[in-house]
Amino acid sequence: MDKFTTVSSVAAPLPLINIDTDMIIPKQFLKTIKRSGLGKNLFDEMRYNQSGDEIDDFVLNQEKYKNTNILVAGDNFGCGSSREHAPWALLDFGIKVIISTSFADIFFNNCFKNGILPIILPKKERDLLMDDAHKGSNSVLTINLENQEITRPDGSIIKFEVDKFKKKCLLDGLDDIELTMKKFEKIKSFENSYFQKFPWI
């Protein structure tokens, strides 16, 4: 997993509430176990019509938001089924930060495990950032995870909270496998001593 660094980007506004994981990545795209290639199907049913053409007024199809790294979303983002393909698709598209008032628990934790920073803010502060996002291409947000700060286009700063362990994992680029591998020598030592005690296993 890549280390999380400071992210500066125009933010895309997606004010819909209760965006579930099937909206993020519909079920027909869950056959793959690869983390790459899902970005083109992110929000598939909202991005494309039945002919496969882009729907012009969907936010991520608009030129000013096509390369965004930040999503400012409505309440209860990532609800529904617990598919890990949802953060895979977001990250593959380029989304590294999602800002909302609330997230579904499983989706929230899956984001951290896949290198995405989900930020929970009070509604008033989220709405300020939503307004910034609606301003488009000259309205850049900067997310500093180390300092836990969001810098708005006018230079004002919004602070956010994040779990210390999850923060460290993002900054160091450690997913569950990489965390386990940091204990490799201890695991190997345990296995050796265990098999000496129980050689018949």
Image (cartoon, grey):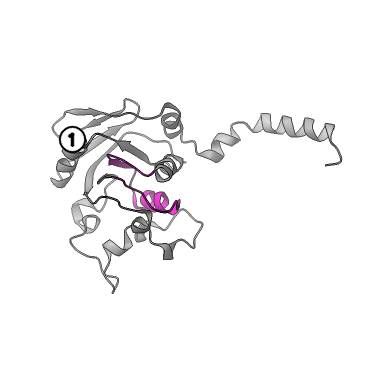
> Is residue 89 depicted above or below 169 in this figure?
below
Q: How many marks?
A: 1
The question of residue 82 being in magenta is answered with yes
Is 2 left or right of 55, judged from the image as shown? right
Secondary-structure class at tag 1: helix
The question of residue 167 being in magenta is answered with no
- Which residue is nearer to you in this view: 48 or 80? 80
- Which residue is nearer to you in this view: 164 or 184? 164
- The stretch in magenta equals 76-104
Q: Position of residue 4 (x, y in %)?
A: 39, 36
**Residue at point 23%, 59% (across, down):** 61
List the residue tagged with mark 1.
124
- Which residue is nearer to you in this view: 37 or 23? 23
Quarter-of-image position of residue 188: top right
Is 33 left or right of 190, judged from the image as shown? left
The residue most toward the bottom is: 51
Q: Position of residue 153 (x, y in %)?
A: 16, 35
